[in-house]
Amino acid sequence: MAASSGCGQKRKTESANGGASSKKKPNFAWNKGLLASMDDPELQEYVDEKVVIIKDKYPKAKHHFLVMPKENIPNLNSLKPEHLELLEYLHEKGEEVIHRTDETLKFRLGYHAVPSMSHLHLHVISQDFDSPCLKNKKHWNSFTTEYFFDSEDIMKMLKEKGKVQLDSSKFQDVLKRNLRCHVCRKDFSTMPALKTHIKVHSYKNT
DNA sequence: GTTCTAGAAC
DNA sequence: GTTCTAGAAC
């Protein structure tokens, strides 16, 4: 059967790397990974003159896309008032990809308060969170707590304040909070228990 | 962001 | 003994 985990784990049988120089994987600049992913045709979902949409390399739900401007905007703190139209465009393109994918499912469009990866990216993620890549508390809390800012709220902030200023220290504790179902608010003590539980809910967009 | 894995939790 | 979490990795 060889059922795989489906979450991009490495094959240990891989050995055709032609040399003894493969002891360690260079981890430096891992946070620049989105730049490479943007140019990967395997991941690209949509491209135009202003944006690139890719499938998240490690999707945390059945459907998980990243909408990114081609313009190099490192993060939310870099946003200026003149970027508002661009944010609206990202949102619009995100909604389009939802309609092309599965409009019967509930989705959210939003930004992480403190993203690990550099280069502004709008998450477009279905709310089932049914994925083998969703593995730990940080994953869960980053999409189901106030760590996840709805795109509309970010746009509103930029519009009203002329910037998006988030205190990153405030969000470290949020990621360590107890595991709680995003639908019925029931608490769970382990990830496996939570992952089993969330399957009982419907994620239809009705 | 992920992988790996020690040792805590059960 | 096995499951699960959480911190280091260059």
Image: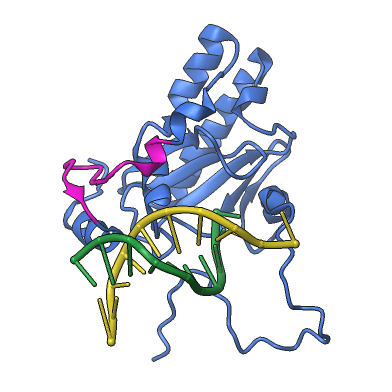
Chain colours: A blue, B green, C yellow
Which residue: 52% across, 32% down? A92
Which residue: 72% across, 72% down? A24
Quarter the C terminus of chain A occupies: top left
Front residue of A129 and A88: A129
Q: Position of residue A16 (x, y in %)?
A: 75, 88
Is A24 rendered above or below residue A164? below
Q: Is residue A157 magenta?
A: no
Which residue: 39% across, 56% down? A136
Q: Position of residue A143 (x, y in %)?
A: 40, 42
Front residue of A91 and A156: A156
Q: Viewed as shown, does residue B9 lie left or right of A30?
A: left
Front residue of A157 and C5: C5
Range drawn in magenta: A173-189
Quarter the N terminus of chain A occupies: bottom left
Q: Is residue A187 magenta?
A: yes
Q: Viewed as shown, does residue C5 lie left or right of A197?
A: right
Q: Viewed as shown, does residue A36 lie left or right of A172?
A: right
Q: Position of residue B7 (x, y in %)?
A: 39, 67
Is A78 rendered above or below residue A139? above
Q: Position of residue A130 (x, y in %)?
A: 33, 59
